[in-house]
Image (tube, grey):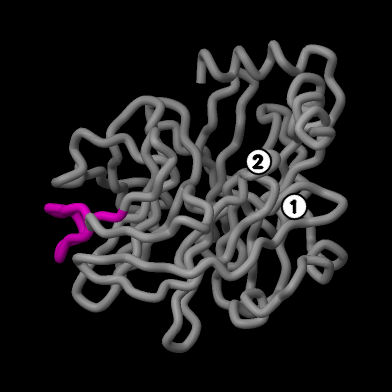
Amino acid sequence: MISKFFNIYKSLFFMKIWSIGIIKISKKKFIELNNLDFIEKNFFKLKLDNKKYTFFADPFPLSKRFVFAEAMNKMNIGELVLIDCYTHKVVKTFSSLDGHVSFPFIFRDKKNIYLIPEISHWSRQLIYKYDKKKNSLTKKKKISGLNSIRLKDPVLYKKKNYFLFFNTKKSKKIDIYFSKKIFGTYKPIKNISNYQSGHRMGGDIISINNSQYRISQNNSNLYGDGIKINKIIELNSKIYNEKFIKTLKFNKIYGPHTISFIDDKLFFDYYNLEFDILAFFKKLIIKVFS
């Protein structure tokens, strides 16, 4: 009861100030962690001094140097940006997207790089092709089978000959769709078992040797305060089954909320709480207009 009251108090009078952290750690070592003390003590913070944006979150690395992220502008609209982690600067804003953008998931297939951001505020899900030479989004395509669905935090994963879309709808339950082609037609996996784990995706699927792990958000206390590690037991076109392994969260800061690897480099977001007497009204405005 005291914990619930304290969380309500935080929600009413505090604003989340999001940041992006980076640390060198292998996927295997990360999955084996029992807590995040090592990361919390040793991570490198991106110090982005950009007056156009109030915060940066949802990092997905294009390379060890460049990372896609959501940048919240002063109108409380998330913009898609590319950040240079060496210079701590925004090097590109992708203004071609029409509304609020978050969770800019990257999917690589052969030589192609695709961007699959969450655009559920204003559109059904689209897949964008990224041109590395031009540093631009050159094509966008609809996804057959998902034409009428607005996805939350979509993640695309390829297993053998199948493309699998992990996502969350308004029900907050995880949904998975499969197809033999990247643009569909996608069909739902009807038998999904993940009752003990978090639902909303918290990053890409992590593969270690012959094992796969789904990262989900831990929203049991405060939103964005930690992730859950779930081992995938069975995944095919008919059934999905996973086993909850553990929850990982920081001690002195809140998070992580989204994680993503490139080689042995981990990118993640986290937040601190900042007192603001008008916090509730600002959050209400964000909810209404974003």
Q: Position of residue 230 (x, y in %)?
A: 52, 67
* 276 displayed left or right of 221: right
Q: State which quarter of the image contains the N terminus.
A: top right
**Residue drawn at (81%, 40%) of the image:** 272
User: Element at badge 1?
Assistant: loop
Decide: marks 2, 1 in contact (CB < 8 A)? yes
Residue 138 place in picture, x, y as percent: 29, 47
Element marked by disc 2: strand
Using the image, tell me which numbered label, if any, was put on residue 242. Answer: none
- What residue do we see at 49% from left, 72% from top? 231
Q: Is residue 103 above or below residue 189?
A: above
Rendering quarter of residue 287: top right
Amino acid type shown at disc 1: Leu
- The tag on residue 56 is 2
Q: How many tags in the picture? A: 2
Extent of the magenta region: 176-188
Spot occupied by residue 149 in the image (x, y as percentages of width and height):
26, 36
